[in-house]
Image (cartoon, rainbow, N blue to C red):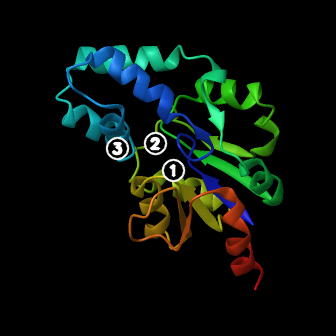
Amino acid sequence: MNILWDFDGTLFNTYPAYTAVFKEVLGDEGITEEEVMSQLKISFSDAEKHFRMTEGEMKEIRHKIACLPPDAFRPFAGVEEVLKYAQINVIMTHKLREEVLAVLQHFGWDTYFTDMVAGDDGYPRKPDPASYQHLHNQYHIDLVIGDRELDILPGKALGIKTCLFQNECSGADFYMEDYAEFAKIREHFAG
């Protein structure tokens, strides 16, 4: 099985660190962690619009996130077993390549991934399917795993099976709350 992964919120639980950065920049103006996280789970641009952020605030947030150490993020339990199972793993992320590689290398996971399209590679942002098409042409992707609808829409457009992680938004072929549930998905592809 060849899997295309989203990075933030799918492989690594990055949302707590991102939420803390957003709250730090926005101040404590009655904004809850839950509100920030729910907006981030849609997209960074949705959070920007929802909180009416200035370009200066977004620039500060991007800078602070880029400066976070790799150990600010935790891999989700069980995801490594899925990575080991897959024949090919690739990543499509809006995060910068250098930042992704630092986290992967910190956890010793860089060897699990054959390829990556990162935010600084010049592809249009999701949900545009161009980056997925590129990876699919190279590796014949069987499954796209992401935590946001934005992550699965390009896969759906290309006719690839999709899985939403910790998100019940309609439209995915499969859903998982944790990676122990991957066995059911694996059975589908084996049968």
What is the CA distance from the residue labelled 1 to the residue labelled 2? 6 Å
In percent of the image, x 62 and y 55: which residue is there?
4
Which residue is under mark 3?
38
- The amino acid on which the numbered mark 2 sits, given as a three-letter code, is Tyr
Circles 1, 2 touching at the beta carbon (< 8 Å):
yes
Mark nearer the N terminus (3 vs 1): 3
Circles 3, 1 touching at the beta carbon (< 8 Å):
no
Q: SS class of the residue under badge 1?
A: helix
Mark nearer the N terminus (1 vs 2): 2
Q: Is residue 189 left or right of residue 94?
A: right
What is the CA distance from the residue labelled 3 to the residue labelled 1? 26 Å
**The N terminus is located in which quarter?**
bottom right
Q: Which disc, if any, is residue 123? A: 2
What is the CA distance from the residue labelled 3 to the residue labelled 2? 26 Å
Position of residue 19 relative to residue 160, above or below, is above
Position of residue 153 relative to residue 26, above or below, is below
Q: Residues within 10 Å of mark 3 (few under 14, many from 20)?
A: some
